Amino acid sequence: MLLAAAVVAAAFNLRPAVTSLGPLLERVRDGLGMSATVAGLLTAVPSLCFAVFGLAAPGLARRIGPAAVVTAGMGAITAGLAARAFAGNTAVFLLLSALALAGIAVSNVLMPVIVKRYFPDRVGPMIGLYSMALSAGTAVAAAVTVPLTSAVGGSWRAGLGIWAAAAAIALVLWLAALAADRGGNSAASRETAGGAPALRILRSRTAWALAIFFGLQATGAYATMGWLPQIYQDAGISAGESGVLLAVTMVISVPVSFALPSLAAARGDQRLFVVVLGCFGLAGYAGLALAPAGAPWLWAVLAGLANCCFPLAITMIGLRARSAVGVAKLSAFSQSLGYLISIPGPVLVGALYQGTGSWYVPIGLLAALLVPQMAAGVLAGRARHIEDEV
């Protein structure tokens, strides 16, 4: 129960470092004298950090154990978020943000490993809890950062720094869980170290398919979160309502993220879920392109359902390997490569919008990317294990 609580607390803290910054970005720019170019690059920094630092997670887990690495990750998030609130210039702000993102990256990769190692018979329900908490943290940080900032005096420094308190709670829980299970964590470390050299992940077709699926779903999710309000505002919907509609896309994923992993794990084969979620995305994009103001709430719900490919991908990572060794390598490979794939998407959407002056081409691109996403997901969703392929 202590470890389950620690998993939920960690998951809640894996996105506020990113989603709390967006609503306050203009104030941060003014306070630090940040250029528009650097502010634009900030949208790509999280994915880049997730990809680069995530690759280090399996090696760290082999040395000190996955639970210890996640504990250190919570410490990095806490320290990074607390310290960047006092940053005096842009360079220091970016460096401390990278520290927090590094903690998020290693935790991203190793949370499926923790679930597989400590909850082998409850992979679906535990990934459901993890995904639900992650979605909740994403939505809550986006929704309440501005009101919280106003409540603590209006300073962007206080508004960003307050999220370090939530990360500190997760850190305390992980320290307690680590102290209560020193032997189990050491065993996990030895297990990972002993089996890692024999598993050549690059030879697995399923691993490549899962990485592509992860990357394309992340592309759609980040593009939606970044540009959906602008799509609605260009259709004549007020800024306030467009913000609420964005919140709907995030909130709808909270209950679905809890239920979907259990359903997917119980089925064994996840191809049906891949196709159904992809069809939701196609319907949502069609509505946003042709009649964004016609049924805006419906399009928001459909977009939110399409973004639930994330918990499905995390579930498949836990199911496509037989052991914690395989899950560690598969998680690092698919998430790191996937986040690299996702980096150009939101930037390209913005460039197409600026170049064409309308949303038909950018939304058409996102809809077209759903086709290879579903194809890769169908390959990754077959009931098989990467150990059998390599």
Image (tube, grey):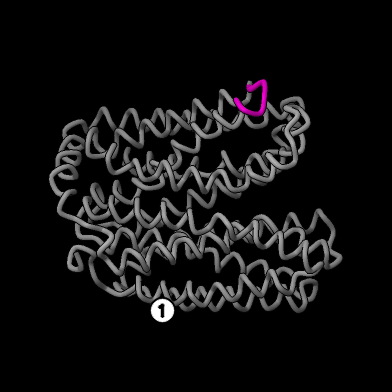
Q: Give the range drawn in magenta.
A: 87-92
Secondary element under disc 1, as helix, strand or loop, is: helix
Question: Percent position (x, y) of residue 212?
Answer: 43, 65
Q: Residue at 29% of width from left, 44% of height from top?
A: 58
Q: Which three-letter amino acid code belongs to the residue tagged 1?
A: Leu
- Residue at 76% x, 38% y is 26
Q: Indicate left or right for 355 with 14 as reference.
A: right
Residue 39 x/y as whole percent: 69, 41
Q: Is residue 169 magenta?
A: no
Q: In this view, does 231 lie to the left or right of 247?
A: right
Task: List x then y, in percent, for residue 62.
Answer: 22, 39
Give the labeled residue for mark 1: 272
Q: Is residue 56 above or below residue 334?
A: above
Label 1: how many Cα within 10 Å (few below 14, some 14–19, many 20+) = some
Picture quadrant where residue 312 is located: bottom left
Q: 134 or 389: which is nearer to us?
A: 389
